[in-house]
Image (cartoon, rainbow, N blue to C red):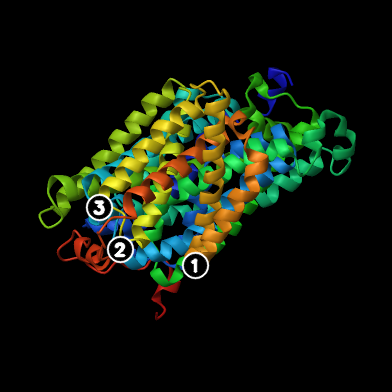
Amino acid sequence: MSSEEMAVQQLSAPVTIFLIALFFGGTLFMSIMISKKKENADGYMNAGHNIGFGIAATSMTATWIWASSMYASATAGYTYGISGPIHYGLWGALMILFIYPFGRRIRAVAPRAHTLAEVMYARHGRSSQLMLAGSNVLGSVISLTSNLIAGGALVAMLSPFSFTQGIVVMAAGVLLYTLWSGFRASVLTDFAQAMAMLGAVVVIIPVVFFAAGGPGMFEAGAQNLTPQQSNFFSSDAFLHQGAPYIAAVLAYAIGNQTIAQRLFAVREDLIKPTFITATIGYGATVIGIGMLGVMALYLGMEPMGGDVNNLIPQMATTFLGPILLCVFFIMIIGALASTADSDLAALSSIMMADVYGQNVAGRKKANPKTMLLIGRVTMIVATAAALYFASGQMSILDLLVFVGALWGALVFPVIASFYWGKVTNAAFTVSTLVAVAIFIPVRFEMLPMITPVGLVVDVLSVVGVGVVLGLMAFGFFGLKPALWVGSIAAIVTAPFGIGFLHDYHVLSGSLVAYAVSTLVCYLMSFRSKESFDFALIQKRIGSFDSEEEPEKALDDDTTSKR
């Protein structure tokens, strides 16, 4: 497709300005409606642990769906065929579901917590807390940067405005409505953003499908696919996309503050229905968007500029009329804004609770007014940093992989710390550091995979398969079934995995991180004489506001009796 044809489909400058003003003006209005003359620190971080089902479920869905995840799902469809979006969306959706049994335990142990790192401070001490908090600071800044880049690219492609103008407007818009009320503004606006995304997907995907040729497109374009792309049970799709993503999203789910923040905010008795609903919403939306990539593959479309991230806007400009192109524009802005405001809220909570509240002033001496100031300054600084990184259009893939691996190395130590009293601070810290140290050379192919090295990597990867599946089973069924599932999974995988898993460095790197952190943490803990009293966590974590007002429910269903 020529650039001239592409330009015909661009939105005019007045229309672009109107859409941006409509979206961010609406979210700002919603934020003003719930704002208080006197905000309190705890409400700013977790909305008083009193969010109802509707707001919580849509907020979880909107946060999990970010602009890059839409682009990545379409890329998976274009690269691996129809099984690509299934692997991307299905496993991501199931990981939301797998969070809730662990989430119920975490809330039971720490019902008044603000961050997961804060709980690690109460459970272990400073090093574990700062390790988890530090990984989240890095991850949220990178996520914020990625969403601004997606927004800038969207504006540059669909309007007369430049990439730089796009990222500045997106950053200013998100910061404007999030700054005053923090997390409360984030979750409330997520509701509108999620509705916009879901509604757009329901309309846009069928329109593009029929405009591109309908069912006949699959028959006419079958010759554009390789045998692996044509195969719904493609081994390439599973080993390159599905399996690594299973490991990555489990790590993201357990270690990421944007998810933990919603876990701590939703009313405790609504955790299960919230996560089940978010599972369905995420899967339907992301798999649906990924089908745009599948259609582009069947149509033989070449990505504009050779960049597969352009596939979604390219499909939109090719097959959508002016009205639906405006709807599409709002959908992508909603996806990036819903995650960007979550990143800002997560960063502010970490700086308020973990840095100032626990390590600078101490919980009993922390000044709530100072905490609010720190939270707002954090949002401004984080936005400026993300703008700086986004303006250079830096490649953030390696950093994203690094942060994902760090969370993978943290998964077993974090989960074990909520169930097993023997886990020590030293075991938590050392196991995580060793896992990351081994992951880096495996993931970035720094080691020659000769027979001894490759064999060790394969064995650890097989153990990692057992750990991942065992942890999933543990959340729902308990320890004994988890041990059986993990052991059987490792035994079944061994004959097939040993000898070739090291060739898939993304997958093997993540699995090695799981395996090493689990083995080291267990070996350093099982002989420990420590038996931690989990009741201490509730005593060590509480509200920072001395005279905390009950937070008004953000959803009508929270007014019902428990």
Going by the image, does 130 lie left or right of 186?
A: left
Q: Quadrant of residue 56?
A: bottom left
- The mark closer to the camera, 2 or 1, is 2
**In the picture, which quadrant includes the N terminus?**
top right
Say the numbered circle drawn on residue 110.
Answer: 2
Residue type at mark 2?
A: Ala
Residue 21 at x, y percent in the picture: 47, 40
Residue 107 at x, y percent in the picture: 36, 64
Q: Quadrant of residue 451?
A: top right
- First of labels 3, 1 by sequence position: 3
State the CA–CA distance, disc 3 to disc 2.
14 Å
- First of labels 3, 2 by sequence position: 2
Toward the viewer: 143 or 187?
Answer: 143
| Residue that mark 3 sits on | 124
Q: Quadrant of residue 423?
A: bottom left
Toward the viewer: 169 or 118?
Answer: 118
Q: Quick check: can you spot residue 529?
A: yes
Which element type, helix, strand or loop, lies under badge 3? loop
- The mark closer to the camera, 3 or 1, is 3
**In the picture, which quadrant includes the C terminus?**
bottom left
Residue at horizontal 72 percent and vertical 18 percent from the top: 2
Toward the viewer: 230 or 405?
Answer: 405
Residue at horizontal 56 percent and vertical 29 percent from the top: 454
- First of labels 2, 1 by sequence position: 2
Going by the image, does 507 lie left or right of 172?
A: right
- The mark closer to the camera, 3 or 2, is 3
Residue 380 at x, y percent in the picture: 29, 36
- Local packing at callout 1 (Cα closer than 10 Å; few below 14, some 14-19, many 20+) is some
Going by the image, does 53 lie left or right of 233?
A: left
| Residue that mark 1 sits on | 272
Residue at horizontal 47 percent and vertical 46 percent from the top: 251
